Amino acid sequence: MMNTSKNETPDTGKPSSQNRYISAEQLIAKMKIAFSNAKQPEILSQLATVGITEPMLDGYLNEITNLELLSQKQIQEYGEQYAQTEGFNLKRAEIENTYRRHRNLAKIAMNGDRQAHTTLGTDEKVKRAYPAWYQQVSNFYAQILANPTFKAKAATVNIDDAAIAAQQAALEEISALKESQKKELGEAQKATEVRDTALDLLYPKYTRLVSFAKVLFPDDQTLEKLGIKVKSVE
């Protein structure tokens, strides 16, 4: 879950010097407590003197309801993205385990064949970055199929047409998984952007209420009802 830094000074809406981080969900919960409890008669009567009315607070709470829905959507989208990533990682591990076994067997079967090692890429380390890895694994099987000599030697260590076809099918599957993963990530990022935009619009209204409350209510208990932490004096 993305953390959202919203620990800002109430009067300016700019980040405070404490520079602490809380999640967007925690911030939404804090604002909901403040706006809800601000409607208590003894608190509302004082806030009304500075222009904060019950209809205004009702409007803020409607925005909170929307924010809660947007936050749930954001969490859902990231959950789907994580699921896609897990599926992708499992498929890649499956393909790579077989590929590593095949390339080690091919090294033995084609021992001394410099052309084979260079063409199949068995003289290189296994790539880590996905695009390079995908190209390396794809090339290995494609080159075996394209060269009768390579194919004959590979078959002696059970890298036959069926084994190659299975790996190529798995490569097609992981390519589709990668595209799906990108799509889910884009949707998750968009959901975060929409939620954060709505949060940024409501947050100044919250900090304004907090600023007024600290002036209007010297009583610590009243501030605590609004979810405002009061520093204890030693």
Image: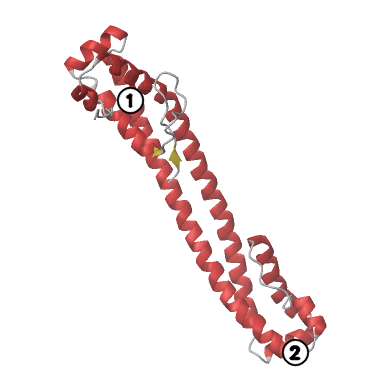
Residue annotated with mark 1: 62
Q: What residue type is labelled 2?
A: Asn
Q: What residue is at 65 percent from the left and 86 percent from the top? A: 105
Q: Nearer the viewer, residue 162 or 31?
A: 31
Q: Give coordinates of residue 19: x percent, y percent.
A: 44, 34
Quarter location, residue 5: top left
Mark 1 or 2, which is nearer the eye? 2
Q: Is residue 98 left or right of residue 22?
A: right
Give the Cα separation between the discs numbered 1 and 2: 72 Å
Q: In this view, does 131 lie above or below 163?
A: above
Q: Is residue 198 left or right of residue 221?
A: right
Quadrant assignment for the C terminus: top left
Q: What residue type is labelled 1?
A: Asn
Residue annotated with mark 2: 111
Q: In this view, does 186 lie above or below 16?
A: below
Q: Give coordinates of residue 28: x percent, y percent.
A: 35, 33
